[in-house]
Structure formats: C-alpha cells, structure tokens
Image: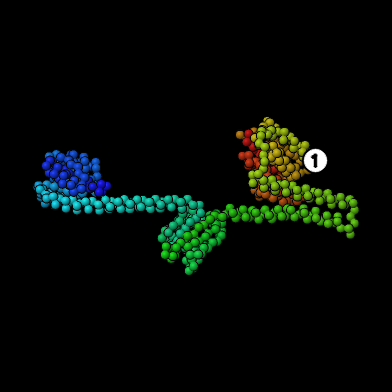
C-alpha cells in the first residue's frame, strides 16, 4: 500500500559494498533507508532524524560504533540500535548492550538473519514508542491533577465563607483560612479528630449527619452567636459528602458571617419600634382632641376649642416634619435625591439663617454673632447645604438657654471650608455625644423634656456632609454648650 508506513533505518558502515547492499535489501523489504559512510556522518544523521532502527559498524576510521550508538541514544532513546562487526568479542557485546544496543550482529550476516533481527528490533521500537506515549500522557495527567488541586486550593482559600470537611470518623481533611476565624481556632491538624474542638452547636450539626441513616437527603443549619475575641453571628450548614457507591465519605460545613445581617435586622426592628412610637403619640393626641370636639354631650368653651385646634396643629406639624425627615433619609439611602450640583456661595446661606429663625431667636432673646473671614463656595446642591445649616441652627436655638448666645464662624482649614456653630446651651454628656448622629436619638434630661424634635435632624446633617466628602466634629460640655464644626471641601 502506498500510504503504508515504512520503518526508517540508518545504516552506518565504512564498507561501501556492505552499506549499499544492505540498503538495497532493506528497501526491497519495505524499509526506508539512509546511509552514512563514517561515524561522524552517522552521528549527524542519527541525531537529526528520529530513526526507528540503526545498524552501526563497530570499527570505523574516525569514530567507533560505541560512540555513535551513545550519541544517537542520548537524543532519540526509542531508536533501536544494532552493532555490527567482523571482530566480535564478548566484552564488546556487553559494552554495547549496556549503553543501549538492542543486539549484536556479527559480520558477515545472512539476509534472513538480518531481517529477523530488524523485525524483532522494530517490534521493540513500537513498544518503546507506546510506552513513551503512555508515560507522557501519565505525566500530563499528573500535571493536570496537580494543577486542578492547586486551583481548587486557591479557590477554596479565597472563599470568604468558612469551609471545613471532616471524614466519616470526624477527622479534618480540608479547611480554608476563614474556617479558623469562624471556628475560633488557631490551627487545624489534618487527619486528627476535630469535632470535640468545635463550638457545641457546630459539632452537633456534624454529628447529626454522621448519626443519621438518611444522610444523603439531609442538611442541618443553625444561626450561632460566637463570643470570643469579637462577637460574631454565623450561619453554619452541614451537608453530607457521599462516596461514588453511595456510602458516607464525610461532612462539609459551610460557615457564613451574618453579623451585618443581624445588625440590619436589629436596626430594622429598632427603626419600626421608634417610628411606631413617634407616630403614635401625635396621632393619639390629635385623635383625642378631635373626639372631644366631636362629642356633642360635652360643652367646650370656644376658647378651649381653639386651644385644642392649636395643639392639634402643633402635633400634626411635628408629625409632618417626622414624615418628611423619614422620606429624606430614605431618598438618601436609595440615592434617588435629585440634585442640582453647582457652585454654592456659603456666606449668603449662613446670613439668611438669622432672618429665617427671627421669631425663635427673639422668643429666647438669643444673641447671634457672625464672623466671616472669607466668602467661599462649594460644589454642591444649594437646597441640601441650606437644609444642613438650618438643622444645625435649629439645634443651636432649641437647646440653648434663654438669653443665650450663638456664634457662627466661616473660615478656611487646609483644603476645607470650616463652618462652626457655637452655642451656650445645655450641652451633652459624653454618652449622649457618642450616639448623637443615630436615627431617632434625642438626649433625655431635665432640660430636654419639653423640647420637640424627631431625632432625625443630625442624622440627615451627617449624611449630607458625608455625601460631599466632608466631615463633622462635635465638642460639647454638659450645661455649658456645644460646638459643631462642619468641614466641606473647597
């Protein structure tokens, strides 16, 4: 067949007649033959091309057959080499086979003998090639397994959730660094019993899988508070790891940090409770006044009716302010506030505060002093900056003493515009100061019981300042006064 593969043979011999005669014989038998007339040429051909078989004369004028055999075998170990010579000796046969000769053929050789030896050699060559192929494939698979293992470890170690795998007898076989934190362990020894070192509830989740017969369809989960170096809430879930035959290989435990979720749940609960309380009081008061006004069996003087209506209006005003403040905070959280960002001059806004709060200032006979060292501007929404200053001015008036003082200063501080509101009011205690910007927080003492408010004003102030990359500081002394410092980028 034209496409049938012809085994490649290299004949290296300095006897021209033998070399050419061997070439003709082998080509008639279907071999592809190249020849070399000395050792140097034989090494050049044999190392350049991967021959299936090589016939190498032992004694040549330049390089002997042993050297040629050695050089070819180094480059192409699957080439089956034969040593041929008329000077056969036992020592030479041993030496040539030691360095890779398949066989030793004495000269002169019969065609039948040569062809038989070459057939055996070619069969050996095919085995070597197949063996080399399997070796390469095995090494490739081992490299792939090693790569997959490395990649798996990289993936597992990068997971922020804690991961621990134990075998069917409770020994740790795999874990990631996050597991150490959530299991509150400094280290985990692999192939050592681990269950007795775990948090009791986590150990119970694992044991629940190990002790049940229906483990393949069972998972256990629990939310656990871990108290140690830091308080953590975690959700631990244990699931079975089966063998291919269905038997239990072990248990995998995934531990998620749900501390922030728990905080949000607590905040939501507090928020709903606070809102309900703040809404209930004015609604109940207004409802009571309306019920009295609507009761025809009760004779109420006109003057008292007007008082009830006025009080209802005050209650509804506070309720409307609370709802508006809640809407503002909600919009800030959802980032749905529509802003008109432009250059805003701060001085005119601060100067307008005195006119805006003229009645309140007059009612408490408060003296307002202003100091403007410059007339700076900020890139912001004018309405938000106005709301920011109105809330701070409102607090400075509400929590001030009668005949008190308010000082407003506008200066530079590095890359910031510094706006200060100083008052000579009731001030705050250290614990009150810590919670100052929390939603619905209002200081409660003998001075504040008759002061109305939603407890959301300063929370809105903080959110506005933060949204422009600014910062706010508070300095306060109980019964002496408070200073609010607002830093807005120039």
Q: Is residue 333 left or right of residue 176?
A: right
**Residue at 80% across / 48% down in the picture?**
314
- In this orientation, which residue lies closer to the viewer: 468 or 462? 468
* Residue 302 can be seen, yes or no: yes
In the picture as drawn, the residue positioned furthest to the top comes out as 374
Residue 211 position, x and y percent, is: 48, 68
Residue 400 position, x and y percent, is: 75, 43
In the picture shown, does residue 155 fall above or below 193?
above
**Residue at 66% across / 36% down in the picture?**
341
- In this orientation, which residue lies closer to the viewer: 112 or 57? 112
Q: Secondary structure at mark 1?
A: helix
In the picture as drawn, the residue positioned furthest to the front comes out as 1
**Residue at 66% across / 34% down in the picture?**
342
Quadrant of residue 23 within the rendered picture: top left
Residue 39 position, x and y percent, is: 16, 41
Residue 459 position, x and y percent, is: 67, 46
In the picture shown, does residue 436 fall above or below 214?
above
Q: Is residue 472 left or right of residue 160?
A: right
- In this orientation, which residue lies closer to the viewer: 174 or 41? 41
User: Which residue bears the numbered disc 1?
Assistant: 359
In the picture shown, does residue 289 fall above or below 16?
below
The image quadrant where one finds the C terminus is top right
Structure colour scheme: rainbow
- How many marks overall? 1
Quadrant of residue 187 within the rendered picture: bottom left
Q: Residues within 10 Å of mark 1 (few under 14, many from 20)?
A: few
Quadrant of residue 473 within the rendered picture: top right
* Residue 207 can be seen, yes or no: no
Q: Is residue 78 left or right of residue 19?
A: right
**Residue at 68% across / 30% down in the picture?**
374
């Amino acid at each position: 067949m034209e496409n049938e593969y012809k085994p490649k043979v290299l004949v290296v011999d300095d006897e021209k007649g033998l070399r050419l005669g061997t070439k003709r014989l082998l080509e008639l038998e279907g071999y592809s033959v190249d020849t070399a007339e000395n050792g140097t040429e034989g090494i050049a051909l044999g190392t350049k091309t991967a021959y299936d078989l090589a016939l190498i004369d032992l004694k040549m004028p330049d390089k002997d057959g042993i050297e040629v055999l050695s050089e070819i075998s180094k480059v192409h170990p699957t080439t089956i080499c034969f040593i041929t010579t008329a000077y056969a000796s036992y020592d030479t046969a041993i030496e040539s086979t030691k360095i890779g000769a398949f066989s030793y053929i004495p000269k002169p050789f019969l065609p039948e003998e040569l062809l038989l030896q070459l057939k055996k050699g070619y069969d050996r060559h095919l085995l070597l090639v197949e063996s080399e192929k399997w070796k390469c494939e095995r090494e490739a698979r081992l490299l792939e397994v090693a790569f997959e293992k490395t990649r798996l470890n990289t993936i597992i170690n990068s997971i922020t959730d804690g991961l621990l795998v134990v075998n069917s007898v409770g020994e740790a076989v795999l874990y990631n660094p996050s597991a150490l934190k959530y299991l509150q362990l400094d280290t985990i020894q692999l192939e050592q019993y681990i269950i007795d070192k775990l948090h009791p509830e986590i150990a119970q989740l694992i044991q629940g899988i190990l002790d049940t017969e229906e483990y393949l369809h069972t998972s256990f989960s629990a939310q656990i508070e871990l108290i140690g170096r830091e308080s953590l809430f975690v959700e631990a879930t244990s699931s079975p790891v089966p063998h291919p035959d269905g038997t239990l290989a072990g248990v995998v435990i995934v531990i998620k940090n749900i501390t922030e979720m728990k905080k949000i749940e607590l905040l939501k609960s507090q928020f709903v409770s606070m809102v309900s309380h703040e809404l209930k009081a004015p609604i109940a008061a207004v409802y009571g006044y309306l019920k009295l006004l609507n009761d025809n069996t009760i004779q109420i003087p006109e003057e008292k009716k007007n008082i009830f209506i006025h009080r209802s209006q005050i209650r509804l005003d506070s309720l409307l302010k609370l709802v508006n403040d809640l809407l503002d905070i909600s919009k800030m959280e959802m980032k749905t506030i529509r802003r008109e960002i432009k250059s805003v001059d701060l001085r005119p806004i601060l100067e307008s505060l005195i006119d805006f709060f003229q009645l309140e200032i007059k009612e408490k006979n408060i003296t307002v002093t202003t100091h403007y060292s410059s007339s700076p501007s900020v890139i912001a929404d004018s309405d938000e900056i106005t709301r920011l200053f109105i809330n701070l001015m409102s607090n400075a008036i509400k929590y001030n003493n009668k005949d008190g003082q308010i000082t407003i200063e506008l200066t530079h501080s590095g890359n910031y515009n510094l706006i200060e509101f100083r008052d000579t009011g009731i001030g705050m205690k250290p614990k009150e100061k810590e919670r100052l910007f929390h939603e619905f927080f209002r200081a409660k003492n003998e001075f504040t019981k008759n002061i109305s408010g939603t407890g959301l004003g300063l929370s809105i102030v903080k959110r506005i300042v933060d949204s422009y990359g600014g910062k706010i500081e508070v300095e306060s002394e109980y019964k002496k006064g408070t200073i609010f410092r607002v830093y807005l980028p120039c």
